[in-house]
Image (cartoon, grey):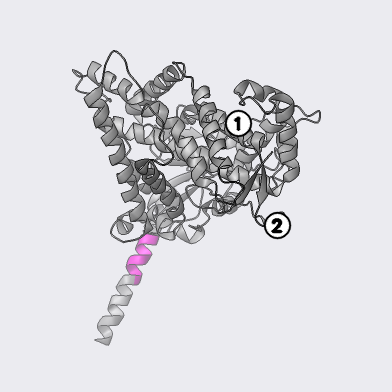
Amino acid sequence: MELLGMTTIFLLVCVACLLLFATWRSMSRKEKEPPGPIPLPIVGSILQLNPWNLPESLRMLSMKYGPVFTIYLGQQKVVVLYGYDVVKEALIDQADEFSGRGVLPLIKKLFKGTGIVTSNGETWKQLRRFALTTLRDFGMGKKSIEERIQEEARFLVERIRNTHERPFNPGNFLIHAVSNIICSIVFGDRFDYEDKKFLTLIELLEQNNRLQNSIQTQLYNFFPTVMEYLPGPHQKMIKNIEAVDQFTLEIIAEHQATLDPSCPRDFIDAFLNKMEQEKGNGHSEFTVETLSRTTLDLFLAGTGTTSITLRHGLLILQKYPEIVEKIQKEIDCVIGRERSPCMADRSQMPYTDAVVHEIQRFIDFLPLNVPHTVIKDTKFRNYFIPKDTIIFPMLCSVLHDSKEFPNPKKFDPGHFLNTNGTFKKSDHFMPFSAGKRICAGEGLARMELFIFLTSILQNFTLKPVVDRKDIDITPLVSTLANMPRPYEVSFLPR
């Protein structure tokens, strides 16, 4: 028995050596591909990566391997681009080659790869073109998108006023307000803040924001086959998205029953009309499934990113009352206290504009970017990147570039101001990514951030519930997105 045990151990060691040799040999044949740590069988580069803080792990690896290097998330190969020059070169100078969407296992499980965000090829091109055109058309209708935001900002201000200076977490108020903008465009109407379905929907999204920080969620991208069968927060995330998807399917069914093709009410009606036009096309990209996923994409993208940015912005501004005073002075000078802020005001408010930009730069909401792929075998610098390789164009390396933004870990609106106080543009400002996969909702998000923030500060001063020196504004880091720390604040009427 003892001899048999020794033989088993010997065989296992031999198999492990053969696997390591095969991996080394495979890497040596690909000497023109980007360098990186030698991956281990099955687990890939996990010994060099901290799943709790992947951006920091990749920063450290870039110091060793340079701005273009390779890692393995489990068995999935990823090429990382670290630094402004390589990110710009890939996403802008070689935009076509890097225009594919890289879908990590968890994202694939959540979003199926059929909407705007996660699709590729002709599906992506047609859905994105249709979405941009349709959203623009509805934005130019009886009530412009800017007017919708101004109206919702007034609802938000009134809701905050009704708290009567009591401290509270403004997260729900902000997510309700921002969500109602995209709901009015996609679903045809805003929701009342007390609507039970709406509140349930928002709670599902908030749960997912919290669950994404769990270790099980981080490990799903390394070991999807194993994690698929294990219980944990990642399973709850999947169920929550399925529930949101069911919500959109119910609204689509209601639209189908009440559709008047001659008078489309919203994005869903326009999509249903397009489906009817392409009824005879057996290869049409316009189906109920793609409508459901596209609607879900628009709803999630139009709700989460902006509301979280605003939430983080209000946390930061509590720490710096002198910045709030400068913004309010600019508001009083340009807008006054009576009328609603509008986008035309922004060009006359360089300091406020700089603060909004600095909030987005500082929080670095999507540090890894949304992954890309190369759509064909690609030569990049002196390296060869095979078709369909996943690419991480690291936004954190651009937004926190110390050459462009001195002391990048410090919140400083001066990063976007010239010495004479005018607004300073920066090519490094890429919170919405860049190139062909730049966020389709960038224009909407910019309007929401400016109008909501100025509307709040036009009417209120922020009073923290803790000493300002104890306010921690550093984001809670995760693989998918950086989140603000929980907090409460009082809004004092001006």
What secondary structure is found at the residue carrying circle 2? loop
**In the image shown, does 474 or 63 lie closer to the viewer?**
474
For label 1, the crowd category at 10 Å Cα-Cα, with few meaning under 14, some 14 to 19 and many 20 or more, is many
Residue 110 falls within the magenta-colored stretch: no
Residue 238 picture location, percent across and down: 33, 50
Q: Where are the magenta residues, as a range?
A: 13-20
Q: Quadrant of residue 374?
A: top left
The C terminus sits in image quarter:
top right
Q: The N terminus appears in which quarter of the rendering?
A: bottom left
The one of 382 and 120 positioned closer to us in this rendering: 120
Residue 94 visible in image: no
**Precedes in sequence: disc 1 or disc 2:** 1
Residue 164 shows up from this direction: yes
Task: Specify few, some or many for label 2: CA neighbours under 10 Å numbering under 14, 14-19, or 20 or more.
Answer: few
Image quadrant of residue 124?
top left
Residue 242: where, in percent of width, then height? 30, 45
| Residue, disc 1 | 450
Question: Residue 219, located in which quarter of the rendered image?
Answer: bottom left
Residue that carries the numbered disc 2 in the rendered image: 467
Circle 1: residue type: Phe
Pick out the residue farthest to the top. 262
Is residue 17 in the magenta section? Answer: yes
